[in-house]
Amino acid sequence: DALTQLKEYQKNEKTSLNESLTSFKNTIDEKAKSAAKEVTKAQIESVKNDIDLALKASLKTELNALRSDVDKGSVSYEMSIVRLNPLLDKAKKLKDRDLVAECLDELFRLKIQLRKYEELDDLRGEYENKYDFKPTTWGNIAIADMYLYRESPVQTNKKKALEAYEKALKSLPNYGEPHAVRLIIHMIDYSIGKDQGAHKKELADAGDLLSRINSGSADVTSYEAYTYLLKSALYEPLTPFVVKLFTKFPEEMTIMGEKATEYDNRLKEAQQKTAKTR
């Protein structure tokens, strides 16, 4: 009858409502759990980032301390490399490309000081395509390959040296040491040249480079190039090439020396002013 049907309808409606409420509650619960998980993941990620930043800052402090010790001469180059290698490994694990590049820059500098040119060349092959080298890293690579070219004047060594020279200047055009390396390579080629044409070409190219250096507005280029040439003149394997440069280009080298001296004087004055203000 009608009353029975009404009761049945109300029963079905109540059941349907309960099912709907249960379903809605389950949906809310799932969303709440999901939101809680996301919050937890975000918190974990935030803590992880904070830890990484702290580790990177600590690593940078250690690297700076090592550089300072090297510059003060309070630690040997060999022991510096022993200290540096774990820092390089940590930087790679942290996947901090800039910090890895800084560690490599210091490693290459130490290898140059130890005259481990072949080892440096091997390091270049290992890391060149993995990280972006700093200009000073390329500068030290150019120095290493220049020495290898002097020891074994094959085109492969010269090509590597010139590639490093160009890459150093691409990032830092006023960088003087690579220019000095290029000038020495010109004198090496002049010395091993077998005919007058080769001699004339090397002298002409070296003269052009000297003119560009001396006519540039950045005296730091002359200062760095001249300083490196003087230092190289004291190292017997390079002495004849540096002497030849001064002999063939006395006027140009005098100009470079004067610009280097002017820059050095300004640098010392600035350092004295800084010291007085402290």
Image (spheres, rainbow, N blue to C red):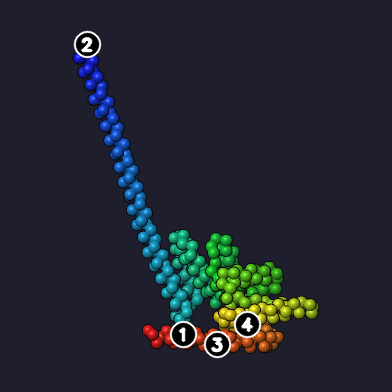
Left or right: where 102 falls relative to 242: left
CB under 8 Å between callouts 3 and 4?
A: no
Residue 262 got which mark? 3
* Within-10-Å neighbours for mark 2: few <14, some 14–19, many 20+: few
Front-lying residue, 82 or 54: 54
* Within-10-Å neighbours for mark 4: few <14, some 14–19, many 20+: many
Residue 1 got which mark? 2
Residue type marked 3: Glu
Give me the C-alpha separation between circle 3 and circle 4. 13 Å
User: Could you tell which of marks 3 and 1 lies nearer the N-terminus?
Assistant: 3
Mark 4: secondary structure: helix
CB under 8 Å between callouts 4 and 2?
A: no
Mark 3: secondary structure: helix
Q: Quadrant of residue 182?
A: bottom right
Q: What residue sits right under mark 4 in the picture?
A: 214
Q: Position of residue 38 (x, y in %)?
A: 35, 47
